Image (cartoon, rainbow, N blue to C red):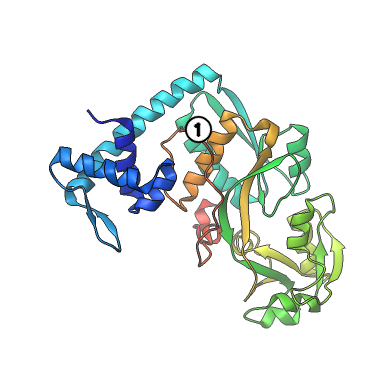
Amino acid sequence: MLERHELEAFLTLAEELHFGRTAERLHVSTARISQTIAKLERRANVPLFDRTSRRVELTAVGQRLYEEVRPAWNQITAAFEQAIDTGRGMTGTLRIAFVAAASGQLLVRAADLFRERHPHCDVQLREAQIIDLMPWLRGGEIDIVLGALPVDEPGIATGPVLLSEPRLLAVSTTHPFARRESVSMEDLARVRLIQLPDNLPVTMLEDRTPRTTPAGRPIEPGPMAATINEVLTLVGAGRGAFTIGAQATRYYTRPDVVYVPFSDAPPLRWSLHWRTDNATASVRAFVQAAHTVTGQRPDPRPPGSRTGIPPVREAPEPVRDEWSRRPASDST
């Protein structure tokens, strides 16, 4: 009979192929993982992993064992967590807001996985303008928002980075930058930057509409816009420029706007946000489902597990431009 900690150690190491990361995920020491795997191999009388000083790999027997055990273990843990959900009243409707089509597509996929794991709790998706997100969240109209980082607001919790995308500069087709292959952050001193409403989080405004370049050169503020279409209308009319994510090249193509890549700008990052006083079991479970569907790393917990939310991790370089890579037929 296999103990739970033995199964978890084997399955996690099979996914991570690294004793240190396995120990970190399971909150035990590396020595404990090594001892557990060695014990399993003695009982099986066959190696499950090939180890060298540089790498860890599954043996053929270990690979077959993983493929047979993982589905069964998922079913067992999901069934148990479903029973817990029912006992704790994880029912009703989770209300989630998003901005723009690309965000909606991600949330639809996360909602499908969430419903599969927690069939007694529904998900309602609502489209919002960027100025609506925090008021709706603080007012209790929604439970979670998918928004851009950074957000440093009292009473607002932020989940893992779900997606990162290259940062572009939107300019009019008549602007001199429209003929360039790239721009730099210092080039912002040569444009008027469209402004966002000042009721947005200060950290977000500083990131999207900075007042100075990294070298301290002033950036001229342009007119204010509250929605993405307002922003691009002003850009197309030559009233200013705007920093935007690469998703715009797929979802917001316009005949009067050109998107020029930055050569030195950090990526735009997106994550889920919720009120700290509303960190319910369903909220935490949805955050985990969203993290899973982005596929940045293996799901660190079995489906339905609610032992915690994975730590924030930056998307690896090069930046994963998930939204702009999706087929056009996916657009909603």
- For image coordinates 68% across by 65% down, the residue present is 254
- For image coordinates 45% across by 24% down, the residue present is 82
Q: Is residue 52 left or right of residue 175?
A: left
Q: Quadrant of residue 237?
A: bottom right
Which quarter shows the N terminus?
Answer: top left
The location of residue 20, given as percent across then percent down, is 39, 52
Image label count: 1
| 29 in relation to 305, above or below | below
* Residue indicated by mark 1: 306
User: Helix, strand, or loop for circle 1?
Assistant: loop
- The answer to whether residue 174 is seen in the rendering is no
- For image coordinates 73% across by 38% down, the residue present is 137
Q: Is residue 330 left or right of residue 144?
A: left
The location of residue 252, given as percent across then percent down, is 66, 60
Q: Quadrant of residue 108?
A: top right
The location of residue 34, given as percent across then percent down, is 29, 47
- The answer to whether residue 232 is seen in the rendering is yes
Residue ranking furthest to the left = 45
| 238 in relation to 4, above or below | below
Q: Quadrant of residue 185?
A: bottom right
Q: Is residue 323 left or right of residue 238?
A: left
Residue ranking furthest to the top = 87
| 326 in relation to 212, above or below | above
Amino acid identity at mark 1: Arg
The location of residue 316, given as percent across then percent down, is 50, 62
Tell me if mark 1 has few (under 14), some (14-19) or many (20+) residues whose alpha carbon lies within 10 angstroms of its own: some
